[in-house]
C-alpha cells in the first residue's frame, strides 16, 4: 500500500506540474489508459492521483465524459506546490503580483502578532537563529543562511498565535523560500554580493529585535520591507530609515500612514512590566553585527 501511495503521489505531482505549466488546460480530458501506459502504473494508482488533484480543485469527473482539468476559478491556489509552480511558469500572468500582494499583507500581520504573543523562549530561539545566520554570512555559506532563514519564518508562524495566518503562510513559504534561496546563492559566492547579504541580515536582525522588544508596528514595517526586497525592490532603500522615517511610516513606505481604524494595543499594566522589554532593551547590542567581516 505504501508503494502504491508513493507512486500515486509522484503521478499527482507530475500532473500538477503539467497543469501549472499549461501543458494541460482547463477542459482538457485526462486519458486514464494513456497515463497507465506512460507511467507504467495501474488504474488504482491513476485514480488515487486524480483523487489527490480533485481535492485541490484541479480536476473534475463528469458522468459519461470522464475526468477533465477543472476551470481555473476552482483551483486551490493556496496549495503550496500549485502556487509555487504556477508563479514560476512564464505564462502565469498576474499571479506573481498577486502572490506579492498576499505576502505583503500576511507576513507583516504574522510578525505583528508574533510581537504580541511570542514567548521569551521563542524570542531567544529567534535571536539565536539570527546569530547562526550572521555566522553563515561571514563564512559565505548560502546553505547555512537558507536553513536559518527558513527556521526563522517557521518560528514566526508558530509564535504568532493565529492558526489561520500560519496556514496561509505555509502556502506562501514555498515562494518566499525560492526567492531567498536564489538570492543567498547568488550573493554570497559572488564578488561584492556579501554586502547585499549583510543588508538582508541587518533587516532580519532588526525584525527579530523588534519582535523581542514587542514593538509590533516596527516589526510589521520591517517585514514589509523584506517582502519588497525579495521582489527586486532596492534593498538599499530599505536600510535608509534606521529610526526616523521608518517610524513615521508604520506601513513601511513613505507616504503611507498607519491604519487609524485598527485598534491600538491595550496598554500594559505599569505595575507588571514586560520582562522581554527589559531583557531586549534598546541599549543592548545587536545579537549579530550589522557589518559582517567578508
Image (spheres, grey):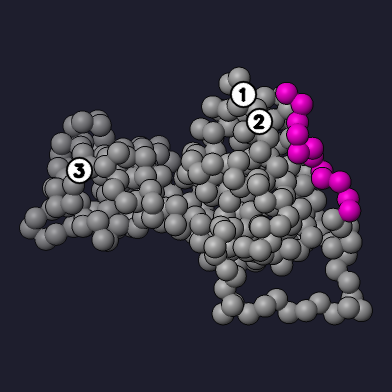
Residue 145 rendering spot, x and y as whole percentages: 65, 34
**Pointers 2 and 1 in contact (CB under 8 A)?**
yes
Whether residue 114 is visible, yes or no, is: no
* Quadrant of residue 265 within the rendered picture: bottom right
Q: Is residue 100 magenta?
A: no
Q: Which residue is mark 3?
A: 24
What is the magenta segment's predominant secondary structure?
A: loop
- The residue positioned 54% from the left and 41% from the top of the image is 234
Of labels 1 and 3, the one closer to you: 1
> What mark, if any, has residue 95 been given in the picture?
none
Q: CA distance from mark 1 to mark 3?
A: 43 Å
- Which is nearer the N-term, disc 1 or disc 3? 3
In the rendered structure, which segment of residues is drawn in magenta?
283-294
Q: Which residue is mark 2?
A: 195
The kind of secondary structure element at disc 3 is: loop
Q: Quadrant of the N terminus?
A: top left
Residue 191 drawn above or below residue 234: above
Amino acid at each position: 500500500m505504501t508503494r502504491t501511495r508513493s507512486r500515486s503521489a509522484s503521478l499527482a505531482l507530475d500532473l500538477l506540474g503539467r497543469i501549472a505549466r499549461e501543458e494541460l488546460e482547463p477542459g482538457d480530458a485526462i486519458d486514464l489508459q494513456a497515463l497507465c501506459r506512460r507511467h507504467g502504473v495501474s488504474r488504482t494508482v491513476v485514480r488515487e492521483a486524480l483523487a489527490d488533484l480533485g481535492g485541490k480543485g484541479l480536476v473534475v469527473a463528469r458522468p459519461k465524459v470522464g475526468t477533465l482539468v477543472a476551470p481555473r476559478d476552482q483551483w486551490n491556489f493556496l496549495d503550496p506546490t500549485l502556487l509555487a509552480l504556477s508563479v514560476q511558469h512564464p505564462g502565469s500572468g498576474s499571479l506573481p503580483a498577486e502572490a506579492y500582494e498576499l505576502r505583503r499583507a500576511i507576513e507583516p500581520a504574522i510578525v505583528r502578532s508574533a510581537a504580541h504573543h511570542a514567548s521569551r523562549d521563542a524570542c531567544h530561539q529567534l535571536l539565536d537563529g539570527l546569530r547562526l545566520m550572521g555566522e553563515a554570512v561571514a563564512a559565505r555559506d548560502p546553505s547555512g543562511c537558507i536553513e536559518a532563514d527558513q527556521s526563522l519564518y517557521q518560528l514566526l508562524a508558530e509564535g504568532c498565535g493565529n492558526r489561520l495566518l500560519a496556514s496561509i503562510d505555509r502556502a506562501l513559504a514555498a515562494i518566499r523560500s525560492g526567492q531567498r534561496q536564489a538570492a543567498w546563492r547568488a550573493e554570497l559566492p559572488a564578488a561584492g554580493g556579501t554586502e547585499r547579504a549583510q543588508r538582508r541580515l541587518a533587516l532580519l536582525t532588526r525584525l527579530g529585535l523588534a519582535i523581542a522588544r514587542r514593538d509590533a508596528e516596527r516589526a510589521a514595517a520591517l517585514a514589509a520591507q523584506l517582502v519588497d526586497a525579495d521582489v527586486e525592490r532596492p534593498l538599499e532603500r530599505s536600510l535608509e530609515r534606521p529610526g526616523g522615517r521608518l517610524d513615521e511610516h508604520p506601513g513601511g513606505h513613505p507616504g503611507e500612514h498607519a491604519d487609524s481604524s485598527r485598534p491600538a494595543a491595550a496598554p500594559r499594566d505599569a505595575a507588571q512590566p514586560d520582562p522581554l522589554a527589559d531583557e531586549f532593551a534598546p541599549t543592548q547590542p545587536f545579537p549579530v553585527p550589522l557589518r559582517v567581516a567578508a
